[in-house]
Image: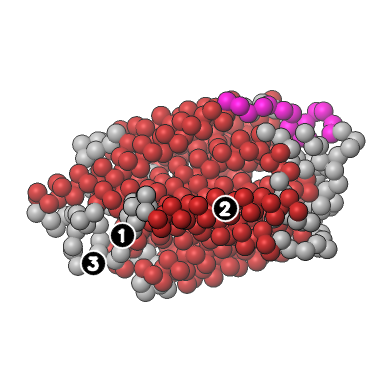
Amino acid sequence: MPAPGLPPPAGRSVRWALLGVMLAMLLSMLDNMVVGTAMPTIVGDLGGLEHISWVVTAYTLTTAVSTPVWGKFGDLYGRKNVYLLSVVVFVAGSALSGAAQSMVQLIAFRAVQGLGAGGIGGLAFALIGSLVPPRERGRYQGMTASVMAAGTIGGPLVGGFITGHAGWRWAFYINLPLGVIALVWCWFLLRLPATRVKARVDWTGISLMTAVICALVLATTWAGSTYPWTSWQVLALFAAALAGVAAFVAVERRAAEPLLPLRIFTGHRNFPLMSVLILVSGVALFGCALYLPLFQQTVQGASASGSGLLLLPLMAPVVVISQIGGRVMSATGRYKVFPVIGTACLTVGLFLLSTMDASTSRTATGCYMALVGVGMGCLMQMVTTIAQNSVEMRDLGAASAAMTLFRTIGGSVGVAVFGSLFNQALHGRVPADGAGGASPAGLPQPARDAYLHSFVTGTHQIFLLGAVVSAVSLAAALLVKEVPLRGGPQPAPATAAPETEPDAGKVSP
């Protein structure tokens, strides 16, 4: 395994700099959770329940497409400036989304948001990796967990409160002041040398990856809803995605500065294994964030703000387990147990969620969500650290972006497939309430019962599929090889590769 050069041990100034980076990360985390809670109200105002999955799919699609591009540009031209640019794009997309007048406009503006989120997610972890060695990184998971608390626990609460008191548009407008604060903070406190590498941008690789991701997401979105799974349109899109992957690999082998260096996949088996695990975590995270609030509001009768509170059992364990896992990893250097426990808990939790029906109590739902939260807490940050530890420092941006890419692909494809199953279950039973909303309250009792039955069937299929995918990923967790984390007691070999940004660990007080 390569042993790249490391940033110096982190100090207090690094903590202040990381706080600005994590504040920017809060933008995309908060947005996902706020929008998920506000989605029923948005549908009630703009209509288009059949397009609900596209509000998330458009965001995750452009996030997935742009993430490796942002990551590579950060490696080539300096991560700080590229990161700040991605925050500006995200804030602009938030302002446009808040002003949307139709579901089509909202989907388009969410795509702009996704472009910025691709840089925020990918480059944030690359910046953290530049400032903190892997062995010490566990100590900073408490800071990251605090951001996750604000984004995942605070997100549903803020989303429910804003939706109920100020309207759903402020679910997007809230990103504007946070974005300005993050920009100013990082501009002054995050000190990295301006790096520019003379290399041709891999435009062919960018084009091929964009085509592959678009074909894959469109195929999974249209299959089972717009077209049958065996239709020529869907099969042609899957074939195009496979052909695109083959062409992408061939191009990356010859590229002078590849978009996704293939060496990060072949250098150590932990990286491809972590890619599988983070993809599965994306499926679970996006699926739960979108469909649990819908289930709680539609089937269990919770209000928008109430469903935000009811998501606490899902989010609180993520924060607590992340902190515990980080401390254990830093103290012992051991980490394999966390992916194993995480995938096991995720599998059981998602299966239990698939058993919910109209008679399931909110207490039982909360217990099921807590088990999913424990699984997510064992996976989300630990997986990224293990992946970064398996690549050279020069590939840190591309590797971090790849992790974010696989998580967003998992979310995008997962939500698309979930939306197909959900729409198929509800076909012909969407309440015609004049506003396009999803509430069955005004329906006659027989129609209401039929609608709720279809709604429960849709959510059952969604979480059962998630449980199956998670069960398969357990095999990947068992294959993880536990190797020493860089920055520990054992020094790196003298043949360490040079760091792309040699002064990346220096942060002004």
Residue at x 28%, y 36% (from the top left corner): 356
Q: Earlier in the sequence, mark 2 or mark 1?
A: 1
Callout 1, which amino acid? Glu
Extreme residue in the front direction: 232
Q: For residue 270, say whether it is visible.
A: yes
Quarter holding the C terminus? bottom right
Q: Which residues are magenta?
A: 478-492
Percent position of residue 467, x then y? 41, 34
Callout 2, which amino acid? Ala
Residue linked to disc 3: 435
Percent position of residue 211, x then y? 56, 60
Structural distance between the alpha carbons of marks 2 and 1: 30 Å
Magenta stretch: residue 34 in it?
A: no
Structural distance between the alpha carbons of marks 1 and 3: 13 Å
Q: Is residue 250 above or below residue 89?
A: above
Of residues 49 and 193, the one drawn nearer to the viewer in this rendering:
49
> Predominant secondary structure in magenta?
loop
| Nearer the camera: disc 3 or disc 2 | 2
130 with respect to 417 (left or right): right
